[in-house]
Image (tube, rainbow, N blue to C red):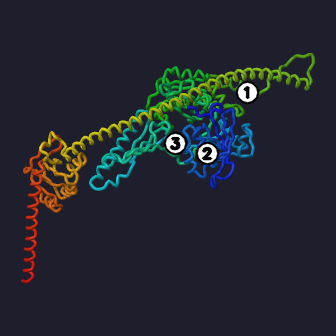
Amino acid sequence: MSTRTSALDALVFGVDVQSGDVRGDAPSYALVVFDGETIERDVVTRRKLLRRVDSEEPAILATDNMYELAADKDQLVHLLRGLPEATKLVQVTGDERPEPLSRVAKRHGVPYGKPAMEEAEAAARLAARNVGYEVSAFTNETTVKVSRGRSTGGGGGWSEDRFTRRIHGSVKRASREVESKLTEAGLEFEREVTEKYGGYANAVFTVQARPEDIPVSSRRSGDTRVEVEPVRRDGIEFRPLARRRDRVFVGVDPGTTTAVALVGLDGHVLDVMSTRTADTAAVIEWIIEHGRPILVAADVTPMPNTVEKIRASFDAAGWAPDTDLPVDEKQHRTREEGYDDDHQRDALAAALYAYDAHEDQIRRVTEQTPRELDVGEVVGRVVGGEPLTAVLSDLEESEEPEEETVEHDPRELTAEERRIRDLQSQVGRLRSHVADLEAELDEKDDQIAEYEDELSEARREERQEARERREATRLQWENDRLETELDEERERADELASKLERLKELWKLDHSNFADVNTSGDLVAVKPIDQFTVDAIEAVDEEYGIASGDVVYLRDASGAGRRTAELLASFDPRVVLRSGGLSDAADEVLFEHDVPVGPADDVTIREVDELALASERDVEAVVAEWRERREERQREQKESMVDSIISEHRADRE
């Protein structure tokens, strides 16, 4: 939740070009590794630098110029995409208009020298002090795209449609799995799908979260591919590591998800955040890092205990509405502000309504406050309940000398003596004031030391918990992935086992090795097909297989056309036994391909489960009868052809 990095508990890499140029020959870099106490120096190639960043995951990769690591904006975006989730790229010399590194180092009291190694060390030390700007090329949105893992072409012929349906169905199932995981994680997202034959060609999810917060990772498995990519900004954004701690109005919405909003004295929203993991102490720490509260507000009345606790911790004024703010009014008041969820909206509404209640008072105080005084301090004290005149008098007291006290001395003092007296009086007052300030400063230093100790301990615990949560999440994802693969393998094993049993049955039939059925040893296997259609033929071929020389039995031979007959003829069966009559087109195709066809009534067929048996002698008889019909048909065709030739010849002579 914190936007700052402490040098005492984070690893910082400082880099500077040692030799070469990122736009030309491969450069070498001066690398300084700084953990707040120890310094490690090394000269590395670009590849080694990136390997160390990947393996050690520093909190900050600091440089005085981001284009020392990338030749142009596209390479910079590529570099940012490849950095570990926990690593920030920081330009310590500023944002779009950087300052010289020497000037920044001098301003912050950091040692500086011209050699590349000393510049790298200066960059590391500055970043460790929260000096500089984080370089960002991506928004807080992420796209998750589920698409085909292979081309739908190349199946060929009648099987290509089934192949395409299978791939599109797999994409649809994978899309539903991704949608389920995003929903279970409580993430907001939008979905766009492209529907195709049998399912989806692709599905694109736009998720309101960063890639590391999404329970889905990029992968490619068989028919599907999942790609997780952060949404790129139009340009490069610079975010300061440490923000100015201006005086602010604070809106708080407590609950399972706690949201905090900060509004400046000019009425502009400075920051807003929400968290489901941080406790009250962490929320107070976030507020401390982002501003100095003069008022803490809630959107309901009375003020919740959590909000009151936060208000008391800052000794700030409090504000709550006369009645709970309606949702439609909160939506209207925050319509021009950016927020991620309803909790942030409620916190924003509380801060903005509190500002509205004090806007006239702030304007009057600003107008009446002399230029030499801190307007923010005056506003803070007046909002806290002190009269404006008393505040101005108190703040101006140290600026103005006290009025001279008239004493009735025996003689009138000279000008020099009066001057000495006034100076001595002023020195006494100043010494007393200095003593008070030193005592107050010592007390504040003690408090700051205690807060820093508590903050360091809280950060260490938070990082440890975050690492444990990430590891637990990673292991859970891996476990889910392995379970899914196991289920798929089990299904495949069941399919193969079933197919093996069917192949064993076919082998028994083809080899006549079944004493309980083939007692005479004069039987042949028959492949029954319920209807003379393309789908029925394909189903039998997929289930049992149709091979050259098989005996095929059509339980219903009617209704077939040329395409269906050509499909059956392509398997080159030994004979086709039919029940019912063939169409002329189908009969013509089978005759052209020399496929014997005969009535099933002439053959005794015995059913065995889903298979069938027939007498070899009956099958041979049907084939022999078909051959006689074929010879007779061929003779008739020849006679018809001769008659046609003779008729044409006579017609020509006449």
Residue depicted at 53% across the width and 22% down the height: 306
Q: Residue beneath label 1, please? A: 396
Tell me: 347 left or right of 169: right
Residue type pointed to by label 3: Thr
The one nearer the camera, 259 or 372, is 259
Q: Is residue 173 above or below residue 601?
A: above
Q: Earlier in the sequence, mark 2 or mark 3?
A: 2
The one nearer the camera, 253 or 172, is 172
Q: Residue beneath label 2, please? A: 48
**Residue 170 pos. (x, y %):** 35, 44
Q: Earlier in the sequence, mark 1 or mark 2?
A: 2
Do the residues bearing badges 2 and 3 touch, measured as CB atoms within 8 Å? no
**Residue 126 pos. (x, y %):** 68, 38
Tell me: 119 left or right of 584: right
Q: Residue beneath label 3, please? A: 139
Q: Is residue 28 above or below residue 348?
A: below
Q: CA distance from mark 1 to mark 3?
A: 48 Å
- Asked whether residue 186 appears in the rendered view, the answer is no
**Residue 628 pos. (x, y %):** 8, 61
- For mark 3, give the secondary structure: strand
Q: CA distance from mark 1 to mark 2?
A: 60 Å
Tell me: 313 left or right of 337: right
